[in-house]
Image: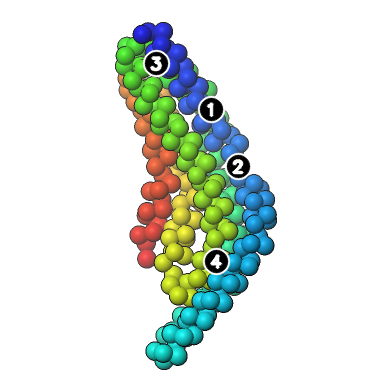
Amino acid sequence: MEQAAQEFAQTYVALLAWSWSWWSGGDEPGVSVIGQVLAAVRPITRWSTAATLALGIVGAGVALVVRRRGSDLAAMLLAVSRTVLTVSAAWLLLASAWALGDRMGRWIVGRGNGVAEYRDHVAHAAAQADPIVALSLSIVGLACCLTFIGVLVARVVLAVLIAAGMPVLAAGSVLGGGPLRIAGAWAVAVVAFDPLAALVYRIGHAVTMSADEPVVVLMVASVTSFMAAGMLPLAARVSGSVR
């Protein structure tokens, strides 16, 4: 049991260190990768945006003829203007905000990200803990690390979907802007994730390094990864609730 617990704990510690090093070191896919994907799908995006805008204008025109309300005409003109602005500037704004958020995150973490000492402290705690406790908390920690890694990947995927889909959603806002508002909330979330995760890491790192009790160290390390992962949906929820 003790040997199995230690081997599992070593796997957890290795994954913990790799996940934080991958994120804090800037090795995760960034703006350049997202830009390459967008360049590949841009022809599809343009045709989809044009078709959606045309259908939206037709639908709004029918509604305008039937209801004869000036607000419908104003909404249609606003949606067309929004589409033009989104097509021309959405990716530039998202890329700039993404880069700024990443720089803020690196600044909060600092030049020395402390991952090596963080890893060693958690590994020492796992070695000192009771084998059953170490095994249980390592399983929990491993799940939290995988959740954090999954969110890092999901953030990039979301950025691609948002950047590619924003023009289409803007064009569709002629008939209703609900989906566009949802996409906007997630756009804010993917940009704000890095600084928020950096704050969580700095606090978790400080608490972990100051703790001596092995159980506390292992629990705080797991909670840190889980809370950092939770910053993405939390930022989207907060952004979406702002009107």
Q: Between disc 4 and disc 1, whose residue precedes? A: 1
Q: Could you tell me how far apart the alpha carbons at marks 3 and 4 are, in whole angstroms?
A: 50 Å
* Res. 126 image quadrant: top left
- Which residue has dot 2 on it? 29
* Res. 102 image quadrant: top right
| Mark 4–mark 2 CB contact (< 8 Å) | no
> Tag 1, which secondary structure?
helix
Q: Position of residue 192 (x, y in %)?
A: 48, 50
The amino acid sitting under disc 3 is Ala
- Which residue has dot 1 on it? 18
Q: Between disc 4 and disc 2, whose residue precedes? A: 2
Q: Could you tell me how far apart the alpha carbons at marks 3 and 1 are, in whole angstroms?
A: 17 Å
The amino acid sitting under disc 4 is Val
> Tag 2, which secondary structure?
loop
Depth check: give the residue in front, 30 or 48.
48
Residue 81 seen by the camera: no
Q: Could you tell me how far apart the alpha carbons at marks 4 and 1 are, in whole angstroms?
A: 37 Å
Q: Between disc 3 and disc 1, whose residue precedes? A: 1
- Which residue has dot 4 on it? 168
Camera-nearest label, 3 or 2: 2
